[in-house]
Amino acid sequence: MEFKVPLQKAKLLRRYKRFLSDMLLPNGTTVVAHCANSGSMLGLTKPGSEVWLSPNTNPKAKLDWRWELVRTDGHLVGINTAHPNRIVEAAVKDAEIPELRGYENIRREVKYGVNSRIDLLLEDPDKEPCFVEVKNVTLKRGNHAEFPDAVTKRGEKHLRELANMRVDGNRALMFYLVQRSDCNSFRLATDIDPTYTKAFFDARDAGVEAVCYACDISPSSIKINRPIPIDC
């Protein structure tokens, strides 16, 4: 995924009310940027951190800036949860995900289950449909990428929906997209949300697959780079 317009470098002053953040531009101006991330963003909100913002070109938007990246421990991390679906979709179309090659059609946000929408539905006349749920991963502890960074009832529901799709004879896959490049493996943050961990193992027992990929991050683009092993 290429950023359509150049990003603006800034300094993080604070994040508050989940979706708001104060940023200091190089010219000394303080602006409010939209934070498109409902998680805790554990480890990513240190005041003074280098951040990158995209200008909001929507004339109806209330804020002029969107928070896209933050630098931590020398590495850029993508925090915008609006991007992962597009990143994974583009990688599937370009056959960069071996686990998801060979499908003729890709649809996004298709209704399924109990009042849910699947992130990606892959279809092919010669294959069973593949329901793909994409989760954005930003938390790092040690050398591990971890999910979730906060209690997620919605994430638990998605695992159970995928398990039901598998029981109905479809293929179902949980895709963890790590929007950073400095992790060697992935594991569940059981101490943060033990209920999600249980739902993950229940889903895996039902036949739901799970894969995890890291990204290359720069102020010009975010692209899937390599798979990382799931350590659970």
Image: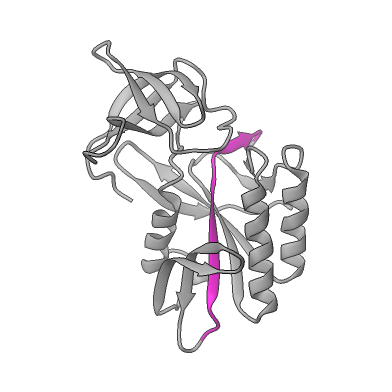
Q: Could you tell whether 28 is left or right of 111 in the image?
A: left
Q: Nearer the viewer, residue 207 or 155?
A: 155
Q: Residue at x 65, y 38 (%)?
A: 150
Q: Position of residue 87 (x, y in %)?
A: 40, 54
Please state the extent of the stretch shown in magenta in the rendering. 127-142
Q: Could you tell whether 104 is left or right of 46 in the image?
A: left
Q: Is residue 108 above or below residue 232?
A: below
Q: Could you tell whether 196 is left or right of 65 in the image?
A: right
Residue 95 quadrant = bottom left
In reply to whether residue 139 is colored magenta, the answer given is: yes
Q: Position of residue 193 (x, y in %)?
A: 73, 42
Q: Position of residue 96 (x, y in %)?
A: 42, 64
Q: Nearer the viewer, residue 116 or 45?
A: 116
Q: Is residue 54 above or below residue 165?
A: above
Q: Is residue 184 visible?
A: yes
Q: Is residue 96 above or below residue 24?
A: below
In reply to whether residue 168 is colored magenta, the answer given is: no
Q: Residue at x 69, y 68 (%)?
A: 163
Tally of numbered tags: 0
Q: Is residue 144 visible?
A: no
Q: Position of residue 41 (x, y in %)?
A: 55, 32
Q: Nearer the viewer, residue 63 or 171?
A: 63
Q: How is the image coloured?
A: one colour
Secondary structure predominantly adopted by residues drawn in magenta: strand
Residue 161 quadrant = bottom right
Residue furthest toward the top? Answer: 28
Q: Residue at x 68, y 71 (%)?
A: 164
Q: Residue at x 21, y 39 (%)?
A: 59
Q: Could you tell whether 14 is left or right of 133 in the image?
A: left
